[in-house]
Image (cartoon, rainbow, N blue to C red):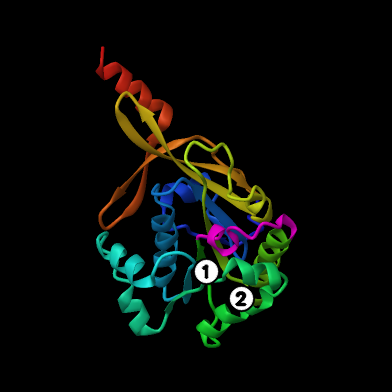
């Protein structure tokens, strides 16, 4: 059967397989998990895959300073500064005070127009908003936050037609998939990163919680962050736990 949708690589070969061939082009996806599990690294890896193919990409930092993010990427051997100099990578910081969100919650158009302005008229293939939770944290009124995020997602898909990644922090040990409880419903797919503590070892995990219109592998896998490579997905978690158990026999 012929694939109906055009796919976009995540930059992680095994994750592409887990998603049924990668992201569907032009859709929006959520990468969620506790602080420090690798969400920003995954999102940068996605952007870097496009930049290496001469695509234009935008990274919107909603929390950390751009210099800190890009200098951190250098520790992995990723030089995003060269793509800034070549004019294909457009990072910028965006801050929206919660008081403004309460007052101008429906003004999502201004946020999307700011992203379009950064692109300077160039077609953009990939966008990252990192973390989306910071955009509306503390707004208080669920309807305003939900509508604000929904309108941003719809406008990015309709006006820019880019494949977009949203990252989202969730509290440690939380069973929720997102900060506000509805980001996952606004996205076409959800990738969950986590940490499993087993017999004194910390294992980073990844699995696909949701992926519309795709045959997915929903198994939980172990991943490691390696210099030059970024996120590298290893064996299923169950196999690693069995191995660790056998080592103690």
- Location of residue 116 with respect to 177 vertically, above or below: below
Residue 176: % across, % down: 59, 41
Distance between mark 1 and mark 2 Cα atoms: 13 Å
SS assignment at label 2: helix
Residue that protrudes farthest toward the bottom in the picture: 120
Frontmost residue, 172 versus 46: 172
Image quarter (top left, top right, bottom left or bottom right) of the C terminus: top left
Q: Is residue 221 magenta?
A: no
On the rendered structure, is 200 left or right of 180? Answer: left
Frontmost residue, 132 versus 98: 98
Q: Quadrant of residue 235?
A: top left
Residue that protrudes farthest toward the top in the picture: 249
On the rendered structure, is 191 left or right of 71? Answer: right
Residue that label 2 marks? 111
Can the viewer see residue 157? Answer: yes
The dot on residue 127 is 1
The dot on residue 238 is none
SS assignment at label 1: strand
- Image point (68%, 77%), residue name: 109
Q: Which residues are magenta?
A: 131-143
- Location of residue 157 with respect to 83 vertically, above or below: above
Residue 30: % across, % down: 56, 54
Mark 1, other Cα within 10 Å: few <14 / some 14–19 / many ≥20: many
Residue that protrudes farthest toward the front in the picture: 99
- Image point (44%, 53%), residue name: 39
In the image, which is nearer the foreground, mark 1 or mark 2? 2
């Amino acid at each position: 059967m012929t694939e109906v949708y055009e796919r976009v690589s995540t930059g992680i070969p095994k994750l592409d397989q887990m998603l049924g061939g990668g992201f569907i082009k032009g859709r929006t996806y959520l990468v969620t998990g506790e602080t420090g599990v690798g969400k920003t690294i995954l999102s940068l890896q996605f952007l870097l895959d496009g930049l290496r193919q001469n695509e234009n990409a935008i990274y919107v930092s909603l929390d950390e300073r751009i210099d800190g993010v890009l200098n951190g990427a250098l520790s992995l051997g990723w030089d995003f500064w060269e793509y800034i100099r070549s004019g294909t990578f457009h990072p910028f910081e965006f801050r929206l005070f919660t008081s403004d969100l309460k007052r101008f919650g429906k003004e999502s158009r201004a946020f999307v127009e700011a992203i379009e302005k950064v692109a300077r008229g160039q077609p953009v293939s990939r966008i990252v908003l990192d973390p989306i939770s910071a955009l509306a944290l503390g707004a208080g009124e669920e309807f305003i936050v939900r509508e604000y995020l929904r309108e941003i997602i719809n406008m990015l898909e309709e006006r820019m037609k880019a494949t977009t990644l949203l990252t989202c922090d969730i509290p440690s040990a939380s069973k929720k998939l997102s900060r506000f409880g509805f980001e996952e419903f606004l996205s076409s797919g959800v990738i969950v990163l986590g940490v499993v503590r087993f017999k004194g070892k910390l294992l980073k995990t990844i699995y696909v919680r949701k992926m519309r219109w795709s045959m997915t592998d929903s198994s939980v896998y172990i991943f490691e962050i390696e210099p030059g490579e970024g996120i590298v997905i290893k064996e299923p978690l169950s196999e690693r736990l069995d191995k660790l158990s056998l080592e103690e026999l």
